[in-house]
Image (cartoon, grey):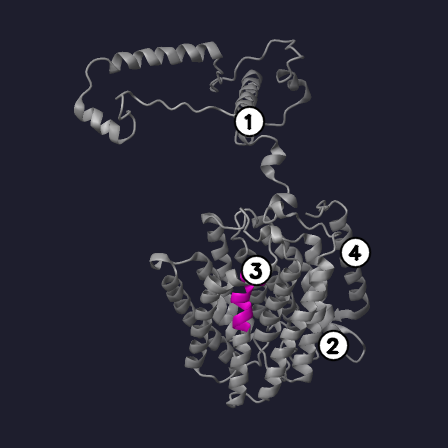
């Protein structure tokens, strides 16, 4: 196994600050405030964006913002020992990604004076560019360092802006909900990166690559937030008016239909018809992804529901059957299953858009819609391979196999920081002064009389070994006297069922638990601390 330098002491601050300083310099050169003279055409659709009040899109922006920072962040907290990184690194990547996305997308739409005018509309598009990184982050979750992920953010958003310009301005394709240019692109970009960063040591799984009850509950928080605000995501950049209303309705109906199909298929494929929390957390959102491309098209409410129904089915089946095949046969270790939530539903959305345009539900060319889908997949595959090779360099502090899916390698562990978990559980007292430390040091005897105990505070008594031994003998003797004499048959049979009496000798079974050295040391530390606290009180 290669040697891993996981220390972030210099690498992470240098990379993070360097990227932010470069971004600030570029903002100083190119970015100014929007002067209110109107917004440009949508970067994700070729519709004319009418002049609107500056703050009219702010509610939509807030909805998308909640999805980026809360929805995506908490959706990835299902790993039992990776919650800090799921939410914390999500915040890091989103905060930097929206700045970088604003620059990269703005370069393709400079005004006549060579400036990028920041408006709410451009902030929404910056959030969209960040979503591609967060989708890819799900594919490599738990197996990469923060430095690697910052490098991925720079490269992925840069490539995304090229593909987005090609789809919207060259092909003139319609993708208002970004099924192709965000979901399909981000998913397959991340999958290719995961393939390049393949770890043979994780072929048979990892003890931390799983969930517990409370981690799944936190992940459901992300699911609910994403489900609630997805109509805003798909309609934020649609043409204002009835077109935007159509996008909201289609997304809402597709999501609702998707929930029913996801629940049904999960119960169908699982043992004894039980529901799998992985399916519920992810497949219930596939309808929002799949309807994105044709969200603003006149496909009818039943059409949106049909798309959601199919999306829920293929997403659930993908989690059940396809993810293990990708891991075992293709070496693609997809941690969050982004292929099932974003990849396949994104392709389904692209195909639905091609059919809808071909049927005349929206003006445009079906061939250009197909070209947009092909372009998104092509940029994802090539860009992901190049990015993965760069991230594979052993200078970015990636974790070794045994420390994957574990926060402690990059985050402070509060229990370890306190030095003793048992002492940390005690009530907090005022800070200890240096002159009191002699109570815990055997070579520094107490030179003065301990102050009397405070009235109303019961002193903590630490019994010695002799007293404990004497008490055990006394209790044993008293129990022996109680148990002397004939044993009632009914009581004996009742106790034997509970496993308290031996079925061979009829004697009572005694279980003796041997303490480890760590437990003994912990008890000793606690006793010393209690003695010290009692004396100081």
Residue 342: within the magenta? yes
Image coordinates for residue 528, horizontal then vertical, percent: 56, 19
Query: Which residue in the structure is indicated by mark 2?
Result: 108
Q: Foreground mark, 3 or 1?
A: 3
Image coordinates for residue 351, horizontal then vertical, percent: 53, 80
Q: Which secondary structure, mark 4? A: helix
Image coordinates for residue 488, horizontal then vertical, percent: 18, 21
Q: Kindly tell me whether residue 296 is visible in this rendering.
A: no
Are circles 1 and 4 on residues that touch, CB within 8 Å?
no
Q: Foreground mark, 2 or 3?
A: 3
Residue 71: within the magenta? no
On residue 518, which mark appears?
1
Tag 2 or tag 4, which sits nearer the N-term?
A: 4
User: How many neighbours does mark 2 have within 10 angstroms: few (below 14), some (14-19), or many (20 or more)?
Assistant: some
Rounded to the nearest angstrom, the CA distance separating label 2 from label 3 is 33 Å
Rounded to the nearest angstrom, the CA distance separating label 1 from label 4 is 44 Å
């Amino acid at each position: 196994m290669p040697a891993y330098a996981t220390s972030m002491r210099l690498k992470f601050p240098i990379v993070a600050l360097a990227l932010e300083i470069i971004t600030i310099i570029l903002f100083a050169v190119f970015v100014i405030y929007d002067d209110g003279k109107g917004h440009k055409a949508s970067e994700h659709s070729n519709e004319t964006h009418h002049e609107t009040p500056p703050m009219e899109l702010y509610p939509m922006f807030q909805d998308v913002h909640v999805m980026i920072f809360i929805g995506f962040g908490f959706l990835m907290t299902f790993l039992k020992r990776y919650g800090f990184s799921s939410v914390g690194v999500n915040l890091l990547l989103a905060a930097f990604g929206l700045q970088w996305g604003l620059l990269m997308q703005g370069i393709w739409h400079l005004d006549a004076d060579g400036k990028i005018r920041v408006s709410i509309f451009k902030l929404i598009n910056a959030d969209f560019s960040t979503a591609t990184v967060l989708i890819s982050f799900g594919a490599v979750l738990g197996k990469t360092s923060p430095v690697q992920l910052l490098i991925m953010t720079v490269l992925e958003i840069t490539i995304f802006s090229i593909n987005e310009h090609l789809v919207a301005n060259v092909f003139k394709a319609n993708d208002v909900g970004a099924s192709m240019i965000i979901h399909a692109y981000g998913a397959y970009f991340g999958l290719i990166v995961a393939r390049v960063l393949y770890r043979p040591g994780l072929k048979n799984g990892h003890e931390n690559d799983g969930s517990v009850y409370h981690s799944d509950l936190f992940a459901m928080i992300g699911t609910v937030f994403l489900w609630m605000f997805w109509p805003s995501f798909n309609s934020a950049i649609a043409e204002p008016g009835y077109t935007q209303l159509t996008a909201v309705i289609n997304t809402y109906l597709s999501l609702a239909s998707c929930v029913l199909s996801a629940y049904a298929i999960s119960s169908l494929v699982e043992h004894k018809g039980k529901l799998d929390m992985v399916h519920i957390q992810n497949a219930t959102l596939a309808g929002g992804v799949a309807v994105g491309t044709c969200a603003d098209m006149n496909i009818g409410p039943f059409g949106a529901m049909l798309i959601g129904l199919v999306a829920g089915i293929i997403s659930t089946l993908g989690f059940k059957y396809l993810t293990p095949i990708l891991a075992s046969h293709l070496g693609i270790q997809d941690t969050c299953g982004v292929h099932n939530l974003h990849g396949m539903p994104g392709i389904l959305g692209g195909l639905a858009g091609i059919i809808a345009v071909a049927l005349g539900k929206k003006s445009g060319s079906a061939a250009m819609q197909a070209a947009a889908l092909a372009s998104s997949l092509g940029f994802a595959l090539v860009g992901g391979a190049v990015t993965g090779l760069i991230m594979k360099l052993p200078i970015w502090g990636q974790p070794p196999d045994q420390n994957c899916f574990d926060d402690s390698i990059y985050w402070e562990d509060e229990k370890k920081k306190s030095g003793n978990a048992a002492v940390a559980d005690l009530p907090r007292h005022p800070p200890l002064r240096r002159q009191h430390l002699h109570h815990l040091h055997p070579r520094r005897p107490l030179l003065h009389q301990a102050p009397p105990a405070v009235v109303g505070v019961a002193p903590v008594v630490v019994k010695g070994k002799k007293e404990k031994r004497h008490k055990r003998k006394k209790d044993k003797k008293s129990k022996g006297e109680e148990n002397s004499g004939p044993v009632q048959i009914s009581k004996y049979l009742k106790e034997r069922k509970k496993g308290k009496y031996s079925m061979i000798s009829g004697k009572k079974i005694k279980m003796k638990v041997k303490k480890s050295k760590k437990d003994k040391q912990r008890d000793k530390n606690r006793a010393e601390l209690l003695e010290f606290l009692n004396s100081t009180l």
